[in-house]
Image (cartoon, rainbow, N blue to C red):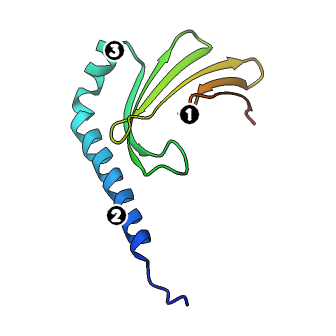
Amino acid sequence: LATGGSTFMQTETRSQDLQGAGVALALNNLFAPLQNRVKRRLGVQRFSITPQMFDARSTPSPIVTFEKDISSRLTGIYSQSLIGSGESLLQFKYNMAGKKSAIVRKEIDGSVTVEIEFEK
């Protein structure tokens, strides 16, 4: 029988989602003044903390991401969850001619995927 109300599990999940997003927002505000210093010290071009999920089974949590341009065509990206099991993701993106990119990614479960992206 559907009554239109939320179940306890739905309410709990929404609460966790908001909590993860709130933590990430607070961390981003805290790190905003230090962002240039972090980028300079670590030698990365981009640094961010965002509320994200690595996969559909995860609860949103703060994810720290570092991006470094290794060459004009190759970018390395490392992301790690700041709470929970410390899940991490490593990705390399190679920009080919003609608006195509090859992406090699080490997934959370240890598997490796390769994708080819075509931009319009």
The residue at which mark 2 appears reads as 15
Residue at image coords 47%, 17%:
68
> Would residue 35 appear left or right of 88 to someone viewing this image?
left
Report the residue at 31% width, 56% height from top: 19
Foreground label between 1 and 3: 1
Can you say whether 92 is above or below 31 in the image? above
Q: Which mark is residue 42?
A: 3
Counting other residues with Cα less than 10 Å from the Cα at mark 2, is it few (<14), some (14-19), or many (20 or more)?
few
Please state which amino acid type lies under the numbered disc 3: Leu
Give the image location of residue 111, x and y in percent: 62, 28
Residue 38: image quadrant is: top left
Q: Which mark is residue 9?
A: none
Asked which secondary structure carries label 3, the reply is helix
Task: Compute the Cα span from label 1 to label 3.
Answer: 27 Å
Q: Which mark is residue 109?
A: 1
Image quadrant for the C terminus?
Answer: top right
Residue at 37% in and 66% down? 12
Check if mark 3's residue and mark 2's residue have beta carbons within 8 Å. Answer: no
